Structures are given as C-alpha cells and as structure tokens.
C-alpha cells in the first residue's frame, strides 16, 4: 500500500547487521514487483559491501558511486530483456567517502529523477543506514532467524522513527 500514493515510490531495505539477508530480500522483492507489472529499479546503495551486481550477474562498473561523483550518468542503470520491468543500478567502485556521497543533494536529485521513470525503487542499504532511509522516506527492516534479536530490531525501528523514516515493517529471513 505504500506504493499506492504517487509520491511514494522509494523504499530502503535495511537490517541490524551485515549478513541478515537484506540484499537477498531486496533482490527478490525487485523481481516480484517487476513480475506483477511494476516498473522496478533495484539500487545497490551499499557502497562498501555491494552484492546486487552478484545477485543479478552484472558487471559493477561506474554505478551509483560514479553517478554521485559526476563520472557517469543514467546509462549505468541496467535493464533485463528477460524481465522487462526490472532494472538494477549497481553500486560502482568503492569510494573513500560513501556517507558523504549519499548525503549530498545530488543523491536526492537522482532519486527524484528516477522516481519519474519507475513505479517502485528499492534501495539495498548498508546496515542501519539512516541517510538512505531519510532520502527514501520509508524502510523495511530485515532480520535473520536465530541471529537478529527482536530488541535490536526494536532499537533500530526507534532510531528510524526519530529520524522521520516511516517503518513499513520487518521481515524475518532464513537462508
């Protein structure tokens, strides 16, 4: 229902820790939305530990970090002939200053531009990434079964709420 409003097309997928499965959940949500006819973009916003290029079998060239640093353009968004409604923006090379890049106005401008082209934008974030969550406006927390504690999820949810990030829910992942 979050995506039913025209001004709500972006969702950050985050977790308490690395290894909780947020990248896996993000990729699968991207495929699911594309299969129901939603023009969907998956952005790998984890500039230190990217995985979406691996999940989708793509090269990780300039990507998001290249766009944010002004060395690349929207040609970095890769579409799939076999999934016509799905596109992926890999992270690109690891910058020395990921938080600074993601905190720049150019990131918000990029998201607004992309929102004009896609119905759903899912951003795979670093763990507990407030900057991306604030830019997206909403987040889904992924926890890993028998690893992530409910108190940790509650604490992250509280921090997100105090940062004006709408928490759409939590997903328990087992893999």
Image (cartoon, rainbow, N blue to C red):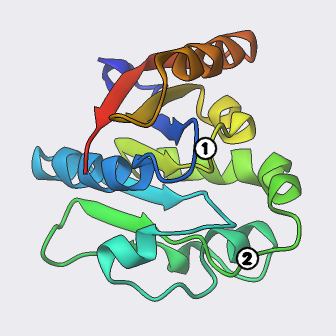
Residue 69: which numbered mark, if any? none
Residue under label 2, please give it.
Answer: 94
Q: Residue at x 88, y 65 (%)?
A: 97
**How far apart are the alpha carbons under marks 1 and 2?**
23 Å
User: Quadrant location of the N terminus?
Assistant: top left
Q: Secondary structure at mark 2?
A: loop
Above-or-below relation of 45 to 29: below
Residue 53 locus on image (x, y percent): 43, 76
Q: Is residue 130 above or below residue 85?
A: above
Image point (50%, 58%), residue name: 43
In terms of secondary structure, where does tag 1 sit? Answer: helix
Mark number, residue 112: 1
Q: Of callouts 1 and 2, which one flags the residue occurring earlier in the amino acid sequence?
A: 2
Image-based side of 25 in relation to 83, left or right = right
Which one is in front, 149 or 15? Answer: 149
Q: Is residue 135 left or right of residue 42?
A: right
In the rendered image, residue 22, in percent from the top left (x then y), is placed at 43, 47
| In the image, residue 152 above or below residue 100 | above
Image quadrant assignment for residue 23: bottom left
Taking 66 as reference, is 20 above or below it?
above
Assess disc 2: are there few (<14), some (14-19) or many (≥20) residues with their C-alpha within 10 Å of its C-alpha: some
Residue at 59 percent of width and 34 percent of height: 136
């Amino acid at each position: 229902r979050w995506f039913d409003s025209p001004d709500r097309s972006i969702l950050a997928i985050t977790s308490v820790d690395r290894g909780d499965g947020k990248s896996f959940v993000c990729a699968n949500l991207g495929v699911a939305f594309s299969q129901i006819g939603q023009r969907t973009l998956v952005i790998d916003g984890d500039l230190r530990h990217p995985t979406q290029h691996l999940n989708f079998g793509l090269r990780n060239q300039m990507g998001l970090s290249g766009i944010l640093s002004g060395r690349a353009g929207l040609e970095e968004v890769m579409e799939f002939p076999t999934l016509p409604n799905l596109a992926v923006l890999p992270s690109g090379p690891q910058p020395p200053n990921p938080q600074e890049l993601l905190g720049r106005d150019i990131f918000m401008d990029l998201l607004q531009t992309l929102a004009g082209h896609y119905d759903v934008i899912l951003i795979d974030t670093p763990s507990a990434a407030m900057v991306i969550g604030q830019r997206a406006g909403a987040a889904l927390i992924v926890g890993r079964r028998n690893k992530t504690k409910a108190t940790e999820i509650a604490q992250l949810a509280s921090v997100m709420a105090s940062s004006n990030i709408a928490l759409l829910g939590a997903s328990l992942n087992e893999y």
